Image: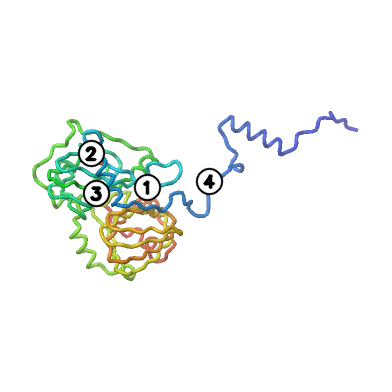
Amino acid sequence: MTMTTGVAAPPRAAQLDELYVELGRLHMEAGWHKTEPSMYPTPKKKFVPAHWSYGIAHRMLVKAKELVATADAERRNLILYNPIADNTYGTAATLVAAYQMIKGGEVARSHRHTANAMRFILDSGPKAYTVVEGKKVPMEPGDVLLTPNWAWHGHSNDGTDDAYWIDVLDAPLTHLLGPMFFQQYPGQFVQTTNEVAADSPFRFPFDRCAARLARQPETAPGLREIVLGPPFIDTMRIKWRLFAEKSSHAEFETTANCVYAVKSGIGRIVCDGIEIVFGRGDVFVIPAWRKAEWHLDAESYVLRVSDENLLEKLNWLKTTSPGSEMENAGNWPRATF
Ligand SMILES: [Fe+2]
């Protein structure tokens, strides 16, 4: 006959609770006990569809120009952050967009950074330039300009009209991965040649893009598209889209984050039940894994900046729509800066 001590072992649940407390003190978490799963069947929709009006941003920049000089601020820009909790920077997970302005006669000092940047010019007079690697590159309305990773760049406006544009950078991705470096140019302004590099490889003038678009077969009824480049930015794919008047388009979920800037036209999208009405100069974002229906009231030129180049390299570019980006992935030529 065996004798018991009379002290029963704690129930299993209580022992597990003790184990979890002990693990916590050791900076460990039981994989079977997480409050949120670390893997899930489809991407989480953390960022939301959102829209920014050029009319409003323009008014804010006009107010700001009386209060802040480019000598005081690195850039006179307005960051378009996605309106979700705990976010004050990214427009989407990997991309940030901003409106920027320099006054006539003003200069924005030169710097460089590891984040890649592109600009889309909304309004400017003659003699507005961005300076990339010592060359003046014109900033004319409709132009798309590239500032790749670690290229010295500044902006100058030798005319009298204020210049307005939209920047898109992969800075949120750079923050996530860690390799952000930034330097101001010694002496403030990068030395430039007087020559204007109108045919710079970093500039895509709108008239040439429009001519390419006109020659392009439709990718869907009422939609023509071109990819800008070479050169290409490793992380961002930049596309012009030309929508026909009164056309409608359905887009399915994609893992790509897409920031849009409107050159001309008017229309609306319905994205996961959120309606966005857009016009000239507006910016909107369709974050990853959101369906969108497009309805165009007028012929519209819309610039699309996505993280597709990055996702494609990682084999993470997926779209639920057959025959679209997913099947075309990998066909684009690539260049390295
Ligand atoms: Fe910059």
Q: Which label's residue is closer to the chain start, 4 or 2?
A: 4
Q: Amino acid at mark 3?
A: Trp
Q: Residue at x 17, y 31 (%)?
A: 187
Residue at the outermost left position: 194
Q: Amino acid at mark 2?
A: Glu
**Alpha carbon separation for disc pair 2 and 3:** 18 Å
Q: Residue at x 20, y 53 (%)?
A: 143
| Label 3 residue near ligand 1, CB within 8 Å | no
Dot 2: what SS?
Answer: helix
- Which residue is identified by label 3? 165
Residue 270's x, y, as percent? 41, 61
Q: Is residue 72 above or below residue 268?
A: above
- Which residue is identified by label 2? 66
- Quadrant containing the N terminus in the rendered view: top right
Q: Is residue 315 visible?
A: no
- Which residue is identified by label 4? 38
Q: Amino acid at mark 4?
A: Ser
Q: Which label's residue is closer to the chain start, 2 or 3?
A: 2
| Label 4 residue near ligand 1, CB within 8 Å | no
**Alpha carbon separation for disc pair 2 and 1:** 27 Å
Q: Which label's residue is closer to the chain start, 2 or 1?
A: 2
Q: Residues within 10 Å of mark 4 (few under 14, many from 20)?
A: few
Residue 101's x, y, as percent? 23, 44
Q: Residue at x 16, y 42 (%)?
A: 156
Answer whether labels 2 and 3 touch (C-beta < 8 Å): no
Q: Amino acid at mark 1?
A: Thr
- Which residue is identified by label 1? 91
Answer whether labels 2 and 1 touch (C-beta < 8 Å): no
